[in-house]
Amino acid sequence: MKVDVVLGLQWGDEGKGKIVDVLAQNYPVIARFQGGPNAGHTLQFEGKKFVLHTIPSGVFRKNAQNIIGNGVVIDPIIFMNECIKLEEIGTPVRERIFISKKAHLILPTHRIIDAASEQAKGSSKIGSTLKGIGPTYMDKTGRNGLRVGDILAPDFSHRYKNLKNKHVLFLKQFNFEYNANENEELWFKAIEYLKSFNLIDGEYSINKYLQESKKVLAEGAQGSLLDIDYGSYPFVTSSTTICAGACIGLGVAPSSIGKVSGIFKAYCTRVGSGPFPTELNDESGELLRKMGNEVGATTGRPRRTGWLDMVALKYAVMINGVDNLIMMKADVLDSFETIKVAVQYKIDGELTDKVPFDPYSNIEPVYKEFKGWKRDLSKITLEENLPFEFMTYVRFIEKETGVPVSIISLGPDREQTIIR
Ligand code: GDP
Ligand code: IMO
Ligand code: MG
């Protein structure tokens, strides 16, 4: 068996949580491979809504094992709070959630460093979620980090103190007020809570599942345009969000990767700073935000909105080797007379269909216009009932990317999903 991957093709918030929850019924194993509580994955079913940050989106499916892979960074406090909420509604978290010992820990001081470095950047700040993601991955690659497996070591609190002291020294360069002891007690309480879970050698577990012919679904966080290498650097997150990250973040060989499903919204959104060529700072952008309820699931910040960007979408399809597309939130476009898609960029008078190196490039999108369908899509459950204008839009995307759209999502609920 192989690891199938579901990942975002834009700047995150494409609807990964909803789709992983839908697909999880067919997978005995769901695994998060990167990111951390910067993610906010929303699921909706039976009139209830849940937002998951660290926990894989298969947690509501009976018999599914949910693995937090080694590529993830975990804030024990956020993890504990998430689990407590799930326990309150009767989800057997210890039966369903397994944590790789090699996943790294976010310390309270990582969050302080995140805030201090964002403040120091001033107007060029990244717009981080301030969950300590960047500083934790810095300690990982700098070989200073603490991992989940370390919590079982007798000298864990000593190692914690050493790292905290390093952070306090590092923080001296910033003109930033903080309390290094804030949340420390709660953090250690959460570490004890973490010990009550199955801490696993994730790479052995996943490869064993594959040998036993169990299908694994890898759930991406963030999106391809936020990837540390291929995103709009420096306005990116600090992990490998693209498909290759599933190999690193789970410990599986490239030859073990199966289907790669790329999720995109029928338009674009972005939270935080950085380039957004098709951004709409007008009434249409406001309408997208309102109809799409585009508010950050983790930070509550309003999301920036704009038209679909085919140049960026094709780029993301290429670097991920996407073999099927999942189209989300077209229902948000229901009331638009005209729908636009950027098909090329004009940079300094030159046309290009490539994403430029420089995030500060002066990009002018070249648009193709489509007639809107002006109908409520949210109640349509059969493909043959989808309006002609909508299908024209879908076929255009398939033709441009060379990849079929296998799933169409027309509302936040599990049921509002057409599998083609
Ligand atoms: P994720 O981070 O990729 O899991 O996405 P988020 O949960 O951050 O954001 C997606 C938002 O869109 C959530 O509020 C979902 O409930 C909602 N959503 C998902 N699919 C659809 C859809 O097809 N139509 C509409 N209108 N909303 C959707
Ligand atoms: P999901 O998984 C949207 C953005 C932040 C910021 C940049 C860096 O829900 O799609 P970080 O906290 O990682 O240092 O922030 O990345 N960002 C996201 N945007 N969805 C996410 O996750 C995001 N995770 C991080 O807004 O611009
Ligand atoms: Mg999200």
Image (spheres, grey):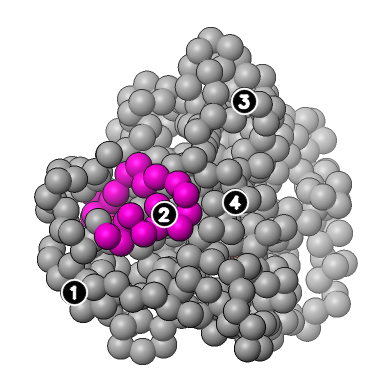
Choose between 224 and 237: the one closer to the eye.
Answer: 224
- Dot 3 lies on which element? helix
Residue at 68% x, 82% y is: 360
Give the residue displayed 15% in from the left and 58% down from the top. Answer: 387
User: Where residue 301 sits: x, y (%)?
Assistant: 44, 74
Circle 1: residue type: Ser
x and y percentages locating residue 382 in the rendered image: 15, 43
Report crowding for label 1: few under 14, some 14 to 19, many 20 or more residues within 10 A (C-alpha): some
**Residue 264 location, quadrant:** bottom left
Picture quarter with the C terminus = top left
| Residue bearing mark 2 | 399
Q: Which residues are magenta?
A: 392-413
Q: Pointers 4 and 2 in contact (CB under 8 A)?
A: no
400 falls in the magenta region: yes
Is the residue marked by circle 3 packed among few (<14), some (14-19), or many (20+) residues within 10 Å? some
The first of marks 2 and 3 along the sequence is 3
Q: Which residue is mark 4?
A: 318
Label 1 or label 2, whichever comes before in sequence order: 1
Q: Which residue is mark 1?
A: 335
Three-letter code for the amino acid on which mark 3 is drawn: Ser
Q: Nearer the viewer, residue 101 or 213?
A: 213
Q: Which residue is mark 3?
A: 256
Q: Earlier in the sequence, mark 3 or mark 4?
A: 3
| Residue 181 higher or lower than 121, as above or below | above
Residue 269 visible, this orientation? no
Alpha-carbon neighbours of circle 4 within 10 Å: few (<14), some, or many (≥20)? Answer: few
Q: Are marks 2 and 3 in contact (CB under 8 Å)?
A: no
Q: Residues within 10 Å of mark 2 (few under 14, many from 20)?
A: few
Please report the residue visible at 66 percent of the width from the left and 88 percent of the height from the top.
Answer: 348
